[in-house]
Image (tube, rainbow, N blue to C red):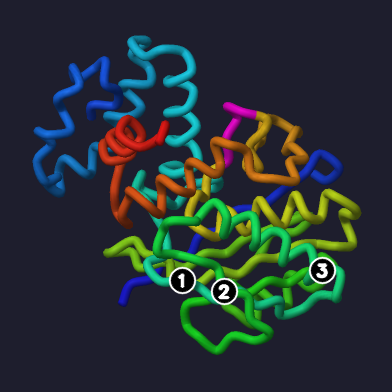
Amino acid sequence: MPLWPMWCSALRGRTGTSLSRDLCGGRCFQMVPPMTRSLRSCGLGVLVGVLLSGSLPGEEKQILRYLNEVLLEKEFGGGDGRILRWIESPEVALVEGSGEHRKVLNRVVGQLNEALEGTSIRLRPVEKSRRARRIEVFMVPQSRFVAIGRERAFEPPRHQDGYVWVIWNTEKKFIQRAIVLVAVDRIEGDLVQHVLLEEMTQALGPLGDTAVTPESVMYAKGQDHGKALKLSDWDRRMLGLLYGHLKPGDGGIEVGVAYARFWGK
């Protein structure tokens, strides 16, 4: 079964389609046919085209740009403008870390599960996971990254505060496994929670950063990678949209329709 790995990282300054009711007259949602393969493949282009058209209200355009950046783009390339997400609830295991780190992880998992309320997916913290569908978390000195990657067949970049490695089925676009690394010797205090929350959020499928809203835990603009300790309102709504109204493999058209139908509910 084909697999595709993807990584995203937190590199901080210290180190180096009818997308709106206005556009479709409020009638498109009863008329959207099943998406063909060719139409799906151009979904990202449709979304980007509408964003650039200038015909959307300001806030709506910003929200759609945010959704495009976090859901359909990938921080370091390797994606194809399709939705990635879990289809089974993954277990979450702290493989290496202290008791204090476990407390931080529990707070992060609690936030994410609140955002996933009402969907079929929940993160399930366990002491040790043997399931194939799992998120492994390492809160370790950065010098451990290389060895952990070698043991799990990937090569993490150096000089990172945080890093997530995601493996998904390339045909059906569902996530099968994720590994989260946090360099606890490079950061301290609240920044540990921020980095862990960012990487755990991206382990759920939103693998892109966004420059749209500084309140987002996935905010990145130049050397500014934000310091959010909580999911923003948009982050929570995005996860609800992803796991309540989108499927693996969906593209820009489906994202736009889901936004117009469900974002404000």
Q: For the C terminus, which image quadrant?
A: top left
| Magenta residues (range) | 209-213
Q: At x 43% / y 56%, what residue is drawn?
A: 118
Secondary structure state at the residue bearing disc 1:
loop
Q: At x 51% / y 58%, what residue is drawn?
A: 204
Secondary structure state at the residue bearing disc 2:
strand
Secondary structure state at the residue bearing disc 3:
helix
Give the mark, 2 or 1, whose residue is nearer the N terminus. 1
Q: What amino acid is at disc 1?
A: Ser
The 10 Å Cα crowd at callout 2, few under 14, some 14 to 19, many 20 or more, is some
Q: Calculate the distance from the C-alpha at mark 2 to the C-alpha at mark 1.
A: 7 Å
Q: Calculate the distance from the C-alpha at mark 3 to the C-alpha at mark 2.
A: 17 Å
Give the mark, 3 or 1, whose residue is nearer the N terminus. 1
Q: At x 15% / y 49%, what residue is drawn?
A: 37
Of the pair 58 and 210, the residue shown nearer to us: 58
Q: Which residue is mark 1?
A: 89
The 10 Å Cα crowd at callout 1, few under 14, some 14 to 19, many 20 or more, is few
Q: Which residue is mark 3?
A: 101
